[in-house]
Image (cartoon, helix red, strand yellow):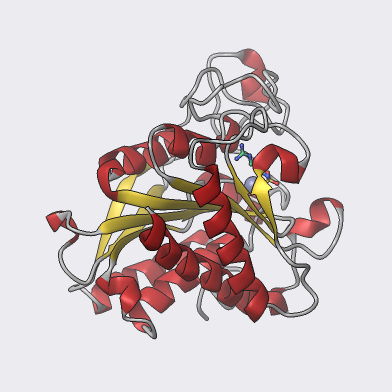
């Protein structure tokens, strides 16, 4: 069973990555970026038809599962790997770009959502504060160094939107930051995959203002949403595209997408994949939708890459 056909545990997702890396050594290099708070590897694949280290092509970075309970997101990332490596149907995508895919940015939380609490969101770290021992975990998407600690976040460790004791207190967010930094000069597109709500969000999330590149962000965002819609099952609603705050309806600071844009990635998006039910049940899409959602998400990512190249 493949990680884009069903909800699988971390070891099965990692086995798939190992297998792809072993079977396609000429185009795939697996990297262990580091270890999570609880010591699990955090892995990503560098996919390149030439040599990633030549640094000759634009880079596209896709991550998923910073939020543990958003189980539909690792399948979407795994399917991107499948389409880039095992089932290449569009040569353009490897000819023109180098890819970095990190399917599980928060492995501790992801495993905890399987073993203990299905709707766990945060990391599993504890720090000096006594409250954090009672209430482990930081919201990774409030932990980046961008207007950190100001809106849509809490300084209470027991809150689901706890931003941490300081920006980048979490090893998991530092590892994402490091990937951005290492590839910044040639990264044209960063997509961080979340769920749920069928949305494509772009900066700035803290105050709803628009970036210098708002026209590009909106143009590529709409092209991605159109591509998803063209492929989608009618049970899912059409994606909404726009500024994070305006589209979600609440402000958020310390988010990955805003951070990546602030350090210079021209096109950065948070995808909110679909959910069919309300409340936390929206994070649990029936397994029969895993493959279709993974496929439609790939339409968005691949069109995003092509449009990004045309405008950046
Ligand atoms: O609140 C979040 O972190 C994201 N929604 S989720 O339901 N997956 O938790 C949206 C974050 C978007 N905000 C910014 N990019 N600023
Ligand atoms: Zn999320």
**Which residue is depicted at the point 70% across and 22% down?**
154
Residue 263 versus residue 167: which sits nearer the camera?
263
Residue 108 versus residue 252: which sits nearer the camera?
252
When the figure is inspected, residue 175 is found, relative to residue 86, above or below; the finding is above
When the figure is inspected, residue 22 is found, relative to residue 120, above or below; the finding is below
**Which residue is depicted at the point 63% across and 60% down?**
71
Drawn side of residue 249 relative to residue 302, left or right: right
Residue lying furthest left in this view? Answer: 54
Q: Is residue 6 visible?
A: no
Q: Residue 100, position in %: x, y?
A: 35, 57
**Which residue is depicted at the point 67% across and 18% down?**
155
Q: Is residue 184 visible?
A: yes
Residue lying furthest top in this view? Answer: 129
Count of marks placed on residues = 0
When the figure is inspected, residue 101 is found, relative to residue 67, above or below; the finding is below
Q: Residue 173, position in %: x, y?
A: 46, 36
**In the rendered image, which quarter is residue 82 located in?**
bottom left
Q: Residue 60, position in %: x, y?
A: 37, 57
Residue 116 versus residue 306: which sits nearer the camera?
306
Q: Residue 130, position in %: x, y?
A: 63, 14
**Which residue is depicted at the point 77% across and 71% down?**
236
């Amino acid at each position: 069973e493949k990680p884009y056909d069903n909800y699988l545990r971390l070891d099965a997702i990692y086995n798939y990555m190992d297998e792809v890396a072993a079977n396609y050594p000429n185009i795939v290099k697996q990297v262990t970026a580091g270890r999570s708070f609880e010591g699990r590897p955090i892995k990503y694949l560098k996919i390149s038809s030439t040599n990633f280290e030549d640094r000759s092509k634009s880079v596209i970075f896709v991550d998923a599962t910073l939020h543990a309970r958003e189980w539909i997101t690792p399948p979407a990332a795994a399917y991107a790997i499948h389409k880039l490596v095992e089932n290449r149907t569009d040569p353009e995508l490897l000819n023109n770009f180098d890819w970095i895919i990190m399917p599980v940015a928060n492995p501790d939380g992801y495993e905890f959502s399987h073993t203990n609490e299905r709707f766990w969101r945060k990391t599993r770290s504890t720090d000096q504060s006594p409250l954090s021992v009672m209430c482990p975990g930081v919201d990774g998407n409030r932990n980046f160094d961008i207007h950190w600690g100001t809106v849509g976040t809490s300084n209470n460790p027991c809150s689901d939107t706890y931003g941490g004791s300081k920006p980048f207190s979490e090893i998991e967010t530092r590892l994402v930051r490091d990937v951005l930094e290492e590839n910044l000069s040639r990264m044209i597109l960063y997509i961080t995959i979340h769920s749920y709500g069928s949305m494509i969000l772009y900066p700035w999330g803290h105050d709803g203002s628009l970036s210098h590149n708002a026209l590009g962000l909106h143009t590529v965002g709409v092209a991605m949403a159109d591509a998803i819609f063209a492929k989608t099952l009618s049970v899912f609603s059409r994606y909404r595209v726009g500024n994070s705050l305006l589209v979600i309806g609440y402000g958020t600071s310390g988010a990955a997408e805003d951070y990546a844009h602030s350090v210079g990635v021209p096109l950065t998006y948070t995808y909110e994949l679909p959910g069919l039910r309300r409340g936390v049940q929206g994070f649990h899409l029936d397994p029969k939708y895993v493959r279709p959602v993974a496929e439609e998400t790939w339409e968005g990512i691949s069109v995003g890459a092509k449009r990004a190249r045309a405008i950046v």
